[in-house]
């Protein structure tokens, strides 16, 4: 046992956690995934290569709506 041996209730969040990841396939990709990574990086957008055809895009609290619009606009050039 831990502490004084008394069992205390476990309190879980009342809502599911929000995550900052989007998983997506890009079936219309016009170039190899590695080249997409490189081209977007040249535009200041950092992504990682796909895993088994699935890309994982991660955001954080400092990513603004304008940043997301810029990402979508850049991605449209390659899909």
Image: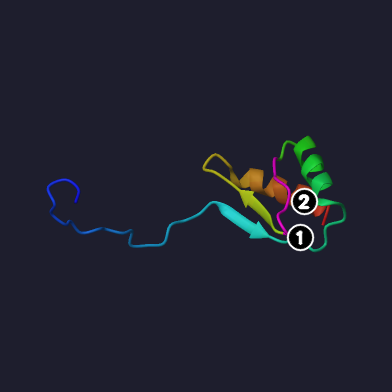
Name the residue rendered at 84%, 45% in the picture. 35
Neighbours of disc 1 within 10 Å: few (<14), some (14-19), many (20+): some
Towards the viewer: 7 or 59: 7
Q: Is residue 15 shown left or right of residue 69?
A: left
Q: How is the image coloured?
A: rainbow
Q: Nearer the viewer, mark 1 or mark 2?
A: 1
Quadrant where the C terminus sits is bottom right
Residue 10 location in percent, x, y? 25, 58
Name the residue at the right extreme. Answer: 30
Name the residue rendered at 80%, 40% in the picture. 38
Residue 63 location in percent, x, y? 58, 42
For the stretch drawn in magenta, the main secondary structure is: loop
Magenta residues? 46-53
Label 2 residue SS: helix
The image quadrant of residue 66 is top right
Residue 78 location in percent, x, y? 83, 52
Q: Is residue 4 shown left or right of residue 39?
A: left
Circles 1 and 2: CB atoms closer than 8 Å? yes
Return the residue at label 1.
26
Q: Measure the C-alpha gap from mark 1 to mark 2.
A: 10 Å
Q: Is residue 48 magenta?
A: yes
Return the residue at label 2.
75
Neighbours of disc 2 within 10 Å: few (<14), some (14-19), many (20+): some
């Amino acid at each position: 046992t831990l502490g004084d041996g008394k069992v205390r209730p476990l309190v879980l969040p009342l809502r599911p956690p929000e995550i900052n990841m989007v998983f997506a396939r890009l079936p219309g990709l016009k170039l190899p995934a590695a080249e997409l990574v490189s081209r977007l990086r040249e535009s200041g957008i950092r992504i990682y290569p796909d895993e088994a055809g699935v890309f994982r895009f991660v955001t954080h609290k400092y990513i603004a709506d304008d940043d997301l619009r810029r990402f979508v606009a850049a991605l449209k050039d390659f899909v």
